[in-house]
Image (cartoon, coloured by chain):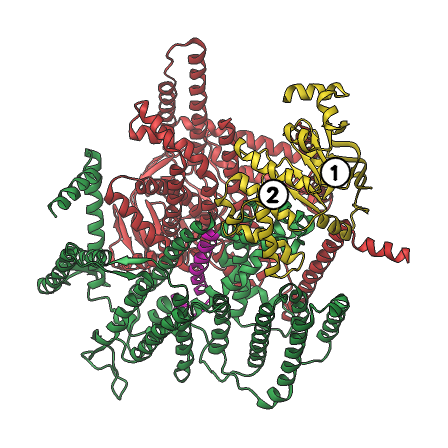
Amino acid sequence: MKNTLKILSFFRNVVFLKWSSQIVFLVGLLYIIWSYIQNAVVNLEQTNIAFSWGWLGETPGVSIAEGMYTLPNSGRQMLQVGMLNMLRVTVTGIFAATFLGTFLGIARLSKNYIVEKTSTGLLEVVRNVPLLVQIFFFQAFVLTFPRLEVSDAGTYNFHVSAKGIAFPWLNRQPTAYLFWVYLLVILILANRIYKWRVKILEREGRETRPFLWSIGIFIGLLIAGWYGGYRVMGVIGFLAKYISTGVDLLPAIFYQTLFSSIAVFIGFRSTKKFIDTKKSEEAQGIYSDDDYFKIILNVIVVLLVVVLMFSSVGLGLSNFLVGDEIVFKADWGVPQFFDGVNNKLYWNPEAKIVLDAQLDGMKRADIINWIAVPGTEVTKGDVVAIATAKDLKGDLNQEISIYAKYTGVIEEVFVSNGDTVKVDEKTYDIRVTDSKPLELSRPRVEQIGTTSFKKYAVGYGKSLSVGYFAIWLGVVLYTAIFISEVVRAGIMAVSKGQSEAGLSLGLGRGALLRLVVLPQAIRVMLPPMGNQYLNLAKNTSLGIAVAYPEIVAVGQTLYNQEGQTLPVFLIWMAFYSTVSLTISTIINYYNRKMKIVER
Amino acid sequence: MVDLIKKNSKLLRESLFSSVGSSVLTIATTYLVINFFRGMLGFALTSDKDWLAVLNNMQLYMVQAYPEEDFIRVWLSVGLTFVLAGLSIGIWRSDDRVKSSQVFNSLFKGGLGVLFFTIIAPTNSSFMGNDGSVITEEVFSMDTRLGILIPVAIFCAIFFSLRFTNIDFSVNSSDMVFFYLFIPVALLWFIKLPTIQLDQNNERIIPDPVMPIAETTKIPWTVIFVSFLVSYFVGMYLKNIKSIKSIMSLSWFLLPLLIFSWIFKKPQIDMSVVLGSDLPVFGVFLLWGFLVITFVNNTIFKKYYSAYLGVTFLLTLVGVFSGLPMLAKTCLLLIALFSVVVPAVSTSSQGKRSLLIVWAVALVTLTFLLRGGASDSGIVVPGSSIFGGFSLTWLLAIFGTYVSFPLGVLLALGRNSKLPIIRIVCTGIIELTRSVPYITWLFFASVTLAVFLPAGVEFNLIVRVLMVTAFFSGAYFAENIRGGLQSIPKGQYEAADAIGMSPFQKISLIIMPQALRAVIPTLVSSAITAFKDSSLVTIIGLFDFLTIGKTVIGNQSIPVNFVGHDRENLIFVAIVYWIFTFTLSRRSMKVEKKLGLGER
Amino acid sequence: MSIIQTKNVKKWFGDFQALKGISMDVAEGEVLVIAGPSGSGKSTFIRCINRLEQHQEGQIIVDGIELTNDLKNIEAIRSEVGMVFQSFNLFPHLTVMQNITLAQIWVRKKNRSEAEEKAMELLERVGIPEQAQKFPGQLSGGQQQRVAIARALAMEPKIMLFDEPTSALDPEMIKEVLDVMKELANSGMTMIVVTHEMGFAKEVADRVMLFDDGMLVEENTPEEFFNNPKSDRTKLFLSQIL
């Protein structure tokens, strides 16, 4: 009797109940998941489409309307194009929406009746109409304009047609990358100079004009850079080449061990740091389930990395580092753009050119002879190289001349692997770099080959496709409206007393907003602002509706081609999670920074 | 009156021209706004727009390809909704009154708006032809302008002067609803516009004959309006009946289910099955429920209550895996759950009565749904699905919210739970679902979901979309509700523990009511987002409201060529969406204010 | 016969030990006042008695039932022990009447009219019958605390625990709550009161205890405690508080 009572009381034990119910739940859940996966396996077997990632390496055989590569040579490259297209909208969109949203938010608080009502009216319209309808509307708006074919070929200041919108733009030349790096470096330098002058000011109590100093030096360096000085950064390419050669020399096992020990070290340090913070007086050494979970997660991640490193994955990675790929990349990939110092001629007899339009069935060309040598002067239209155009199978077909695109001194001539070269009446332009990294040019309408179709010439001005225009304007306006609400709420959250204190110090309305209200409001605004950025990033997926090739549209094209819906879905999930995580990490970073300032 | 003008002009000066910067802003904004509206009006009025493309396709917009002989089902659904709405407005009739001066004022302002647009409308407008040439034409002649201006100006003057007379009465604000609805219904009879008519050879009669805009629908709409009005008075009469409010809430809850089954199926019911199998099962379970309700708090029965529960659950378990008819299985499950709830409620005779009603209603609904659901439908629709146009948009919005809300509550509770495994799983589900845009989930529904289902099981695309939507908006609801849960102080949990409540009682009686009340605004905005997001199904090829406007009509060439007239339709679609979301958000703001008052 | 018995009760929050072995007895009908500086573990101790906190070592026996992980024992003890909190913890979405009847209906399974009758009776006892239909947010702090007491009494507990019931109140409201507590004490209810109100302790308590650093420092009758304390810690405490 007593024993049965004991057993009964065991079943009534709260600890037992807590864990048994959870385990039952987990087992049930796992069973359901397992049975669905089982279904998937059976179903896929029946339809003869086994789950695979092989298509990532295969040539998809479809073209993309716009992006880095219009004729991607692998599924992987095609996805990259989609991702970059998505990021292009997201990143520029976030800046534009923030700017416009802040402006609208302040307008909604304006004392001016008409300004306030107009911005509120805009808000009510944009907020209450589905984004997709708005995007369709913007698309329809551009499509109202006549077809490009009715315009004459030639150069315009501004051009709108059913194919898109084109306007003058600073187009980057091959060495522009060097200039961006240069710009970044001098920005950091100007910031440092500002801080240095402020330090002197604080220490010695004399006026040191920190702002003037930093802006002056910045402008001076900028001018110097624009006229050729930026090529100092070429040293990076120089270093990259040596480093990559060095990396190549070490054996694979070295990298496996190195990465494993780095993982162990980082895992150990973060766990230790975490435990140390919990030991502080405030935390009283209390660990919640979450904390244990974090520690366990740390351990699991570290173990996973170590196991992966010594499995085929790690071996593949190490072999990749040891193999020729990195050196090759340093030669032909990104670092080549840093190679501004030694002004040498790149001539790789193996170099392939992807032609951006079909020329009698030709899709790529191989350079067979460079005529131009660095240091010589060419005028626009001079022949710089001879190449053979080939069709996709690689059969030799016909010889073409490559013409200089600009007049100037040749400093380097190169065609990287897979670079796109322009078609112009059966001849190809090759760019001659002159000293400017960016060049202002006006849009140009040109004939496609010998057909009656026309297009905006690549590299002349900037042309936005209908899809890009519609999705960009759509998400920017839509997000800006929500941001304006966030800004308004943020400003209203700053107490009236703060404004009054500012006014009593004699600040003007503008200065009050800039110096007192906004810095405080930003603290309130940051988290909801981050949510809006996340929404913007997700909303770019509507690009598929207006034929803008972002990741979802590209993914759909791919699975229509290959039938692999599940892997594509997993890639979408991974990509969007990464983007979301990145955005929220950045927002959290600023949020934390703001909070530290507060103390 | 002079004072008023003085006061207003002073206000005007202060708000518009207080400083140089402000004056510049005022002028610039006014210029922009006027030009925007001029452009829009000019755009709408040019002869290359064919607004008949919108007007002539109303049926397509509303129900797509639903067979005409079954339209009565749609009308009945709409009518039932309006009757319920009328009853509810009558029962919850507010005591707020609208003053006559307010009414005059809004009429005056409306008139002013019309005047404004009439004045700024451009006389000439141009559009671009296909060859790129610009065609300019007169779109708004002086005669038309004056023809509108003069009567409207008189209208404005009347209402403006009425404000200063001694006429002073007030109208109940609930009554105003009928006034607002009366105008469009009356207009259906009187407004005449050119409509597209075909002759015997299926050729368009030119010029278009001028006919009332709602030749076919004005009678049903009028009947619905009248029954709306009648049910309003009935509602006022029923107001004082006890528990009428809970009955109404229950009816609103059941209405979508009823309409869904009503429109979806014309059940071809085999009466022999009904009499032979359904009726006995129904009777047995009705009796069972009745016995449980009557005797559960009897002292003798109470002793063996646990044993009874055990036996019932065992029976259910056995029954579910046996060869019983579907109805019996479901009823068994229901009675088991019902038996758990009964003892707490069935303490008074009133409680017993309402329990019995609930049980009977639940059984009737279940029997009807199961029998109807299992039978073949008599409605045959050419093309993909029965639902299309606005009815599909509505279905997605309502059912999306309907299914996802309880799911959201569960996920939020799971994520807030103290049990680590449940918390981690729920967090994972919520975050994974939210990390990806809705459109990728829709693709998942349309192409991937089928892979995971057991062989032979197939769902209609609409059902798959609903399944995915439930999860997607459920995750968003969960995050909103979690915000509410976190706003509840720990003391509330402790107080509930201290008076001996079980975890279930604690959540359902103390925590949830407070948490939900705290997040009503965010819940409503989430529901509005769900409504707007339902338009995304157009991308996966469902024929929702937007698809009809953008794609279907834009490619319509029979009987009249409307190809390329998608801009007019897009504007129409945008306006309809706008009306619904705008009204919804305004209403929710009012409700929010009311609740805020009641709370403290 | 003691109604509450604790033996060597210990409790840790992570590394921090909140209770370092508390042993005591409370007799039926006794009024026990626990005093001590903040952070001394007195609140934690009485929260352990009705299992709002979980003790990790030692024994707590309430009315012959030992408090273990057994669900049935926890339920039984909670139904015998009523608790009043520092921050009232009334349910803000329910009226005063609903606050008091809720647990009677759902936990005690009484019918509504019975429960309402009982609630009115209790509201009269705490002196605010006219507030029955108001929401807690419309009442003053003192009135809220009296409703909280009524809510706890509605469960007909044998023991009442008070966790600093007057700390969150304005001075003029403290008296009305203390009056209700005095009346309750005089009616023979077993009470454990954590409070800083030394006047209340002198007047009503049968015994006074001093907690410090998770330990029971002194246990005495009120006269002895205030006039002739045994330990130096008590003297120090009294000199600071009086």
Q: Amino acid at mark 2?
A: Gly
Q: Which mark is residue B491?
A: 2
Q: Which residue is mark 1?
A: C30
Near-viewer residue (B240 or C213): B240
Q: Secondary structure at mark 1?
A: loop
Label 2 vs label 1: CA separation? 27 Å
Q: In the picture provided, is B424 more to the left or to the right than B393?
A: right
Near-viewer residue (A453 or B322): B322
Shade representing chain A: red
Near-viewer residue (A97 or A243): A97
Residue B527 in magenta stretch = yes
Q: Residue at x 33, y 52 (%)?
A: A124
- Vertical arrangement, residue B139 with respect to residue B225, above or below: above
Let me know if residue A395 appears in the view.
Answer: no
Q: Amino acid at mark 1?
A: Glu
Residues marked 2 and 1, same chain? no
- Vertical arrangement, residue B459 with respect to residue C222, above or below: below
